[in-house]
Image (cartoon, helix red, strand yellow):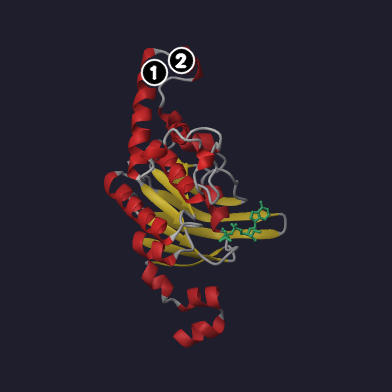
Amino acid sequence: MAARLNLREVTLHFGGVKVLEDVSFDVEPGVILGLVGPNGAGKTSLFNCISGHYRPTAGSITIDGTEVVGLAPSRLARLGLARTFQHPALHLDATVLDNVVLGGHTRLPGGPVSWSLRLPHTVRAEREIRAEALALLDRVRLRHAAELPADELSHGLHKGIELCRALLSKPALLLLDEPAAGLSHAEVEQLIATVRRIREEEDVTVVVVEHHMGLISALTDRVVVLDHGRKLMEGTAAQAQSDPRVIEAYLGKDAADDVA
Ligand SMILES: Nc1ncnc2c1ncn2[C@@H]1O[C@H](COP(=O)(O)OP(=O)(O)OP(=O)(O)O)[C@@H](O)[C@H]1O
């Protein structure tokens, strides 16, 4: 079931640095929301608050009505949250397949004791998860690389592996942090097609941080624009791109005046 995400007055200070100030917005189940804004606007910091890697100084973040501020990332994973990182966090000496399979651990029945005893239902579940991991690799055209060490693949392909790992957990809420960064034009086109298919085939809510406006326009239902840690506006990608406040934030006041 796709998750509902609600943020209320999320604030994050590091000492005297105000990284986020009173950020509020809602993401309805099944929506793809883009989180955009100039460099340093606070997008990744907000992601880190939602995924439990940062604890906001104030405010509330709920997933399907459950307050998640203060919960560890592992607990959030069990609540159905999965994320990718700006710089993929992979085990480079492990195979591509083993990296993806890691995403399935939240779905294994039992706990560490039954896993180490290799009970039949654990072995069966592991086999199913490996088969699903291979199917996901097939979806991003990486099936042929399943048994290669991850460090033999390019940066762009690492992003594909990370996406498969996140999807294997069958997330209700998927956070994608700059999935197009460092990708070639062809790889971005493939990423857009992959995320569209995810939306058609999986029941998932997606929040994506991205500078690539082509991807944001192609994929998102709505965007939230951040600037200097505050929400500047919320609307469709087209509305954001023609909003003088957004143009000013990216390009300066003169450019915004030319548009107005
Ligand atoms: N751990 C931290 N300690 C201190 N300041 C931080 C920390 N993390 C982020 N910041 C500051 O918070 C601000 C927002 O950074 P953040 O990376 O969230 O922005 P962003 O919108 O994701 O930028 P970009 O598009 O360049 O990735 C920056 O000024 C950054 O220096």
Q: Nearer the viewer, residue 32 or 62?
A: 32
Q: Is residue 221 visible?
A: no
Residue at (53% x, 51% y) in the render: 86
Alpha-carbon distance for marks 1 and 2? 10 Å
Q: What residue type is labelled 2?
A: Ser
Sequence-wise, the earlier of marks 1 and 2 is 2
Q: Can residue 132 be seen in this view?
A: yes
The residue tagged 2 is: 114
Residue 187 position in % (x across, y down)? 41, 55
Is the CB atom of the residue marked by disc 1 within 8 angstroms of ligand 1's nearest atom? Answer: no
Quadrant of the drawing holding the N terminus: top left
Labels 1 and 2 touching (C-beta < 8 A): no
Residue 225 position in % (x across, y down)? 48, 65
Label for residue 109?
none
Mark 2 Cα shell of 10 Å, populated few (<14), some (14-19), many (≥20)? some
Q: Quadrant of residue 40?
A: bottom right
Q: In this view, does 34 lie to the left or right of 90?
A: left
Quadrant of the drawing holding the C terminus: bottom left
The residue tagged 1 is: 123
Q: In this view, does 123 lie to the left or right of 14?
A: left
Q: What element carries label 1?
A: helix
Q: Nearer the viewer, residue 113 or 2?
A: 113
Q: Which amino acid does label 1 sit on?
A: Val
Q: Nearer the viewer, mark 1 or mark 2?
A: 1
